[in-house]
Structures are given as structure tokens and as C-alpha cells.
Amino acid sequence: MTSRNVRDSRLRLVRPRPTATARRAVSNRRTRPAPRPPEGTPPASELARQAREALADAVRIARWAASAPDAAVHAVREQAAKALELTPDQASASWDRARLAGLVELHGSTARPGWRLNAWDRDDTAVLRGWVALFDAWSLVHPAPDDVAPAAVAEVVEAVPQVLTLLQLSAGPVLVSALLDLLQQRVAELRDERCEVPIAPSQREPAAPPAAAVSPDDRAVADALLPALMDWALEGLAAVDALTLGQSQATLTPLGNWAVWVKLEQICVAAQSPAGHIEHPAEDLLRACARLSPGPARDEYRAWLAARTVSSAVSELLVAARGEDALLRGLAFEALRVVGAPAEAGVRAAAEEPSLRPYALLWLAEYEGADPDDAAEVLTRDEATWLWVDTAAAVADHGETTLLVRHLDAAVQGTVPALLDEVRAVGHPRTVQVLVALAAAHPDPALSKALRRAAFQVHTGGA
């Protein structure tokens, strides 16, 4: 069976927007009252407790990696297995879960703790977002059998959200046979949407058939695999604690039920922070201002700056920018814009640090008089791509699903294949999570499949 490849015109990006516009996507996001979860949904504190329990193995290996500075990526699994008395397979599985949940990040050949690990014991929102990142990556946590065609696997991954919706709406156990019926219907719909009409040999022209056509034999093979792939998908979702499997039936866990509801409502859990953090550290100030519109946020920055010497304020903001939370990185440079000229020396020094360089160059360009929407011209292609991934990580962690989808418009590349090639090349530590989140959020099946394939390639190519 053939399917739409990444050269399809539908995978061409919408007109590119300046990167400077994209970096304001999180701080300028619209606000709206959050819908209330279904009756019976546990409170966030209880959901976070369950998520911590589900990710206990990943947290353990991540904390071990944090206690071993500059742990070599190629040997971390073997070292962790020995230090934590795990089998190599257990260490490998825990390491992969830690990476996918954002508890560890790769920087070149070394592993470092992710920002979520630092917030794990005190921030329920960070915990829930970490679990949702793992939930979105269930097909990487539990890879499909090697002898199954990738196209058949991709069809099932695309159809799984409908299966989850049935489980969520049923509010109880559902027979696997009923889920399989739905899966088969959804796969058939996906094929119809792609116009994959079987062509009999007698009807074929001498020339090669259209790329979207499939032979009856290929379709029959794919259909025969659906029961086994249904079991694989349910086992993968169970592996991330999204559901439990009983005798020929499946039931969403409270975490899985909540996550599916969140995705159906297209909202994200957001940190709640009131204004008035003048006496607090820079990181607390920035988190508080994340929920404010630009005007009130600037007022809050000015009040915070007034209570400190300029040099100490600039140093504290740059320390916050060096952290693992990409949202804080962008907001720190917004606060430095309020500082103005006294921050120039510190920002110029920050431009020598790879993770801060794009932000610092944009700050300096605007400080020297460039229009904010034209300032992105000072960035190289690699710097612009790094900033795009970093901004996408911020939106994935703290923004709404629709913002993450629209963020594709901000890429400097004209097509998805070009974007994916360059995203892989820049080596941002959050690349896999960003691609998985985009694949889970995007409504276009072909683009979503291309993103998942790229995430899988990056994931399997690293440690």
C-alpha cells in the first residue's frame, strides 16, 4: 500500500512569518475560561500523584544522571543499570521514558537533567505535562513489530485518537472487539480521505498507477494485521499508564481519561500565577508574567527591576534564561528589553552561548534600531531553526494546541521536508518532544505522519 509522501503539496508550509513574531506567541497567547473536566475527574494534585507514580522509574534514572555530571550518552544505560541494579532492558526502557517525558535532555554527547526534573517535587503542572508528553509518544515507548509495514503502523497511529475518544465517552470498560470495529472503520475512512481506491489489474493503464492507488492484495494484508496492531496499540497505551487491560476489554485510567478530555477540549494545563512577585526570584517573576498580556507584564518587569540594582537584575534574568524551560528563556529577554541599554554588555556576552545566541542577537538588533519584525534577518539559518524549535518547546509546554499548530507558519523553511531536515541537523535537545507534540496536535494526517516519522528517526538515532 502506498501513502502520501512528504513531497505532497499539502505538506507545503503556509507563508512564513518573521521569527520575531513567533517568539512572542506564548506571551501574547489569548486567554479564555477553562472548561471544567467531566464529573468524577480527580483533582490535579491526585492526577499528578498518579503521574509521579507512573514515571517513578524514569525519575529514578534521571536523578541518577543528574548526579553524574556530564554523563556520556553512549554509556549512560550501561552505567545506570550497574549503579541502580537494573537489567540492561530495564535501564534502557527507563532512560527512553525519561527522555520522552522531558526529565533528561541531550546536549551533544552528554546528558543533563531537564527542567521538569528540577520542578518534579513541587510543580504538579510540570509533572502532568511530562506525563502527557510520554502519552503522546506511546508508539515510541512501545515500538511496533519489525515485520509490520510502516504504512500499516501509521494508519493505526492516526486512528488511535478515535479509539481513545470512544473509551473516554464510554466512561468505563469497552470490549476490545468494539474498539477493533471502530479502528477498522477509521482506517477505512482514512483511506477514503486519501482516495486510495483499489485498482484491478484489468483496469490498469500501461503506465504506472497513481501514487495513491493500492492493490487489493496490499490492502488485504494490511487488514489482516489490524487485530494484531489493535493489541499493539492498546499495549502501548497501557505501557504509559493511559489505560488498563482486562479480559478482552480496556478501560482508561484516570490519567488517560483526563488527557483525552484535555485533547478533546484543545486546552492545556497552565500554571496559575498572580502578579506581584517583586520580591521573588527572576524565575518566579517570569512564570507569573507568562499569564499576563504584554502591557501588564512590562509594568511588572519595571516594578521588579526598580527593587534591584541593574547589574544584579540582568545577571538574575540571564541565569533564568540559561535554564531548561524555553518559555522562561524568551520571557527573560522580554524583561531585558525593559532594562534597555544597561543590559547591553550582559546580552553581548550571552550571544557567545549557543542556547542564548538567537535571543541575544534579536535583542541586540532591536536595541540598535531594527524593526522587531525584521530583526530575524540577523540570524543564520541554523540559528533561526534552533530558535524555532526552542519556541515550539515553549508552546508545547505552556501554550494551547492551536498555537503549536500555527507555529509551523513561523518556520523559515518553505516545506515540511526542508524544515524536518534542518531541525534534525541543528540538534536541539527537545527535538523529539517537539515533533511528537506537533504530530499529536496537527489535524492533517499526512503532515502528522511525516512529523512522527521524523521524531522516530531522531529518537532511534540518538541514545
Image (spheres, grey):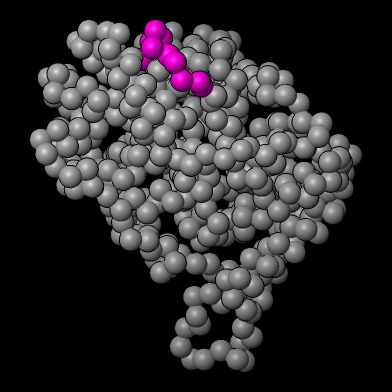
Residue 152 horizontal/vertical position (percent): 62, 59
Of 117 and 343, nearer the camera is 343
Residue found at the very far left of the displayed protein: 368
Name the chief secondary structure element in magenta: loop
The residue shown at (19%, 10%) is 311
The residue shown at (84%, 54%) is 178
The part of the image, by quadrant, that contains residue 332 is top left
Magenta-span inclusion, residue 275: yes
Residue 285 horizontal/vertical position (percent): 40, 18
Instruction: Give the side of residue 50 with respect to residue 349, left or right.
Output: right
The residue shown at (87%, 48%) is 175
Evaluate whether residue 303 shows in this view: yes
Of 81 and 173, nearer the camera is 173
Instruction: Give the side of residue 116 with respect to residue 419, left or right.
Output: right
The residue shown at (47%, 55%) is 450
Q: Which residues are magenta?
A: 273-282
Residue 30 horizontal/vertical position (percent): 48, 42
Evaluate whether residue 319 shows in this view: no
Instruction: Give the side of residue 391 with respect to residue 437, left or right.
Output: left
Quarter of the image where the C terminus is located? top left
